[in-house]
Image (tube, helix red, strand yellow):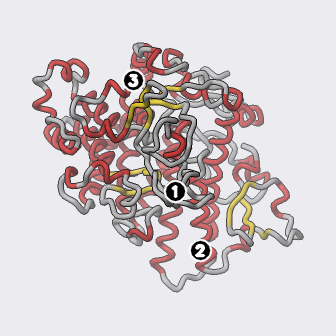
Amino acid sequence: MKIKNIIPVLFVSAGLFFGSCSDFLDRENPNKITASEYFRNENDVLRAINGIYRSIRDNYCLGEGSTAYTEERSDNISTQNNQSNAGEPFQFGDFSLLPANTFLKTHWTRMFAAIANANFVLTYIDDVKFADENLYKQYKAEARFLRALVYFHVVRKWGDVPLNTTHLTSPEEVAEHTFREKQETVYKQIVKDLVESLDAGSLPDFQPASGKGRTCKAAINALLGQAYLTMAATLNDGQRQSNLEQAKKYLTDAYNMRTFGDLKEVPYEDVFDVDKKGVCPELIFQIAYIRGDKDYNSSKARGNQPRDSRLLSQYASTGSVFLPSDLIKEYEEGDIRKEWSVQYSDYSNSYYIAKFRDASAGAGTLGYGGNDWILMRYADVMLLLAETHMQLGEETAAIGLLNQVRERAHLPGYQEMQNNAGYKSKYPTLKLAILHERRVELAFENHRWYDLLRCFTVTELETFFHNKTRTDFGISNPMNFGKKDLYYPIPFDEWKLNPEGMYQNEGYD
C-alpha cells in the first residue's frame, strides 16, 4: 500500500484529513503540524471525528455515489454505457474488472484513508484531558464504529486485507503493516471495535434530528448483528452456530430499540421523503446531505432524472445510463413499493430509478437535493433478523418478521402465498422468499450484492447469474460471472509493490 494512501496529515486551517507523501513530517511547513501535536483540546478531537464522517461520505468510499462498487455489481441495475471514463466503471457490472482499474484503486484508497483517519483519532485521543468523561467515551465509540463499518465493507469486497489499528508515523511502519491478514482476523477486529463501542455506554439509542448522520446504539447493534450473520454464512471456521446466535442477539437488540410498533406504522414513502429524513423512526444511520448546498448536496435525484419528467428533480437531465434490470419482474401485483422505487419513461421507453426525489424549490434547477443516503433502517434489520431465525430453524419467528415487511407493502403474508403457484414456484424456500423481499424492499440501497454473497455459494452464484436473460441488463453481461468475481482484485500497484504480502486474489494473476 502506498504511503500516501494510509498516512493522514492534518491541515490546521481546514481541520480536514488528506493523503500525504513521505515529507509529512516536515515541520518547517507552517501550514501543517505533526499528528502527535494536533490534539490539544476537546474541539480538536471533534474536528477529527468529523473528518472521519466526511471521509465516509466520499462517493469513492461509502457515499451515495458508491453504487458502482455494490449495486451496479449486483443484478439490480442495467448498464447502458461502456465508454465513459475509458470504460472502467462498466467493468464492475460486466464482471470484467481488471486489477489496473483506476476506479477500483480509488475506492481502495478512500476506504483505507477513512480507516487511517479513525486510527489517528484512536491513537491520540488519550492525549487530551476531557472535562466530560462521557464525551471522551462517545468520541472513542464513534471512531471505533466508523472504523468497523469501513472494514466490514472492505473485507466483504476483497477478503484478506491489511489490518491496522494504529496511526503510522514512518515509512518503516507502513512497510511493516503492508500485508494481507486473513479475513477471520479482520472480522475479529470488527467485532472488537463494535463491542467496545457498545460497552462505552456513551451513545444514545438514536440520534435526535440535530445529530442525524452520527452513529447510535441501534446502529452499532445492527452492524454487529449483520457482521455475525455474514461470518456465519461465509467463514468456514467452525463457529457457524455461535455466530448465528450472536447475530440473533444483536439484531434483536437493535429491533427492540425501535420507537414504533409494527412496521406498517411507518409509511414506505416516509422513509424516502426528503422533508422527513430527520424524524422518520425507521431510519437508524445515514449519511447526511444538505439541500441547496453546492458542496454537500445529494445528486441522487438529478442523476436518475429522465429527460421527459420532473418527478425527481427540477434539473434538466439528459437521462441516466443506469436503469433497473430484471428487478422489475420481481415486484408482485399490488406492491406499493414499485411505484415509489421505479417509474416508466415514455421518452426512453424504459423504467428508471425513482426512489430518491427532491424536486423542491430549495433544490432548484441545479438539482442540489437534500436526500440523505440511508445505510441502515429497520426493514433491513428485520429481514436480516428473519434470515437469522430461518438459519436457526426458527421459521415461525422468521415468517412473522417477513410478514411485517410484506404487510406494509400491502401484500399477503408468506403463509397465504404458499397457495399462490407463481410465488411458490419462484420462491420455493423461505430463504429465497426472504431474499426476494430484501431485493424489492431495499432496491438501489447498496445491499443486494452483499445479500447474494451471503446467501449463495460461489458455485450457486455462477448458476444464478448464468441463468439471467442478458437483454435485461443493457450492454453488460451477467453471464461473465465466474469464481474469481467473488472478490475484487487487489489493485495492481498494491500487488506489484509487495507481491508476497499483498498476494493477488485467485483468477486475477
Q: Nearer the viewer, mark 2 or mark 1?
A: 1
Amino acid type assigned to the residue bearing label 3 in the image: Asp
Residue that appears at 58% across and 58% down: 296
Q: CA distance from mark 2 to mark 1?
A: 42 Å
Left or right: 9, with 276 as reference point:
right
Looking at the picture, tell me which residue is in the foreground, 46 or 155.
Answer: 46
> Which residue was labeled with disc 2?
126
Q: Quadrant of the C terminus?
A: top right
Amino acid type assigned to the residue bearing label 1 in the image: Ala
> Which residue was labeled with disc 3?
326
Left or right: 149, with 282 as reference point:
right
Q: CA distance from mark 3 to mark 2?
A: 52 Å
Residue that appears at 19% across and 35% down: 393
- Mark 3 Cα within 10 Å, few/some/many (few <14, many 20+)? some
Left or right: 68, with 309 as reference point:
right
Q: Residue 153: x percent and y percent?
A: 51, 43
Residue that appears at 85% across and 69% down: 27
Is mark 3 in CB contact (under 8 Å) with mark 2? no
Is mark 1 in CB contact (under 8 Å) with mark 3? no
Q: Residue 204: x percent and y percent?
A: 37, 69
Indicate which disc, 3 or 2, sits on the residue closer to the N terminus. 2
Res 317 quadrant in image: top right
Amino acid type assigned to the residue bearing label 2 in the image: Asp
Q: Is residue 258 above or below residue 464?
A: below
Q: Secondary structure at mark 2?
A: helix
Indicate which disc, 1 or 3, sits on the residue closer to the N terminus. 3
Q: Nearer the viewer, mark 3 or mark 2?
A: 3
Q: Is residue 182 above or below residue 127?
A: above
Q: Residue 94: x percent and y percent?
A: 56, 22
Would residue 276 be seen by someone viewing this image from the given angle? yes
The numbered dot on residue 363 is 1
- Report how many numbered discs are placed on residues in the image: 3
